[in-house]
Amino acid sequence: MFAARYVPGQKKLSLTDIPKPKPGPRDVLLKIRAAGICHSDLHVLAGEVGYTHTFTMGHEACGEVVEKGSDISTEFKAGTLYAVHGPNPCGDCTYCRTGFDNLCNGPGRTFVGLGQDGAYAEYLAVPARNIVEVPKGITPEVAAVATDAVLTPYHAIKALGEVQTNSKVLIIGLGGLGMNGVQVALALGAKVTACDLRDASLEMARSMGKLDAINSKDLDKQVKPGSFDVVVDFVGRDSTFTQAQTFVRPGGTIVLVGLGSQQVPVISTPLISYQVRVQGAFWGTHQEMHEIFQLISEGKIKPQVETAPMKDVNHWLEELEAGHIKSRMALLPNF
Ligand code: FEH
Ligand code: ZN
């Protein structure tokens, strides 16, 4: 079968033909219908994550179940779409048992498409417990990107930012995740301000509902410092994290999602004297997968997705790197 594989030291994925995987006793075999691409793929290809082995990439997966392991009694309806919970939790460790399965530290823990074989392929074998049925009416490409580009902002804003009705929220960065973050915050009833340096992204954000969309370079002219209960930084660079510390209120929370740089500056005195909480955010939980698909079904979150043929994955990763992808990109099998 076709598979686009990470090879240590190579800057492009290797397009190969490898044997179709066999599902283990507790696995299902998915025929891939769509796979989202993500900036995390670029960090892997740049060698920043340090994987030393080869595997198929693609951690945003949607497919149909075409085979199941010997221990799986669940009936899977032909044609029904399933989305994969990328953190691939073990289900047994303390984190998995206490509602933090995105932090699973089970034996040999790796993520689908990040350390173990993923969805840039015709087929993918995953534990049956780590798939979620996609409600009818949601396309494969929307379901695929939702497994990260909606799940991550949803977890960051709802679970970690504890955003609720009337919370004042600043969203910094309107890329794929930030744009969905705006919709999540609006769906939770928050008062939302969104900022980005790109006017086109601000325009797109304004179409999502009642919110203020301000160019990041004008923020300090239009907004008082300390105005927000929660600031979500979807970029993660010095400039944006510094802005986050300026505009979060005393006792407020900064949620850091963006991997724009390996470190960001903490300005100690205000952070301490205003008792600001800084919270890292990683992906989301299995339960939250169900919640995001409900919100998408209800039309409260409308992920913007472009599609392209999976065999051109290297071209689209270059386009992502060059900033040419306006929203989120999903690759469709075209074998
Ligand atoms: C994956 C691996 C490490 C950091 C971040 C990610 C995201 O793409 C998942 O949300
Ligand atoms: Zn676990």
Image (tube, rainbow, N blue to C red):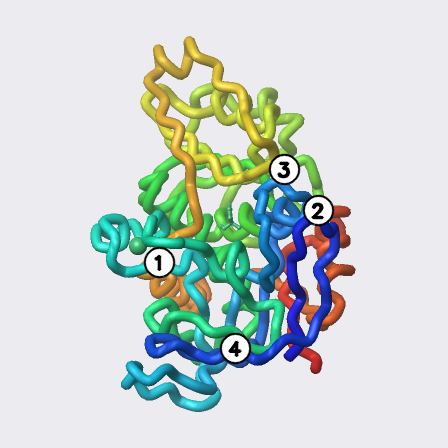
Q: Could you say whether the residue bearing mark 4 is in a helix, strand or loop?
A: loop
Q: Residue at position x 38%, y 75% from top?
A: 27
The residue beneath circle 3 is 196
Residue type marked 4 = Pro
Who is closer to the viewer here, 3 or 153?
Answer: 3
Q: Is residue 222 left or right of residue 89?
A: right
Q: Is residue 227 left or right of residue 310?
A: left
Who is closer to the viewer here, 266 or 65?
Answer: 65
Quarter holding the N terminus? bottom right
> Alpha-carbon distance for marks 3 and 2?
9 Å
Measured as percent of width and height from the top left, residue 286 is found at 34, 60
Q: Earlier in the sequence, mark 1 or mark 2?
A: 1
Q: Could you say whether the residue bearing mark 3 is in a helix, strand or loop?
A: strand
> Alpha-carbon distance for marks 1 and 3?
34 Å
Q: Are marks 4 and 2 in contact (CB under 8 Å)?
A: no
Q: Could you say whether the residue bearing mark 1 is in a helix, strand or loop?
A: loop
> Alpha-carbon distance for marks 4 and 1?
20 Å
Residue type marked 1 = Pro
Measured as percent of width and height from the top left, residue 35 is found at 58, 67
Mark 1 and ligand 2: say if the CB distance to the nearest ligand atom is below 8 Å. yes
The residue beneath circle 2 is 200
The residue beneath circle 1 is 89
Res 21 label = 4
Q: Residues within 10 Å of mark 3 (few under 14, many from 20)?
A: many
Q: Earlier in the sequence, mark 1 or mark 3?
A: 1
With respect to residue 166, does 94 lie above or below? below
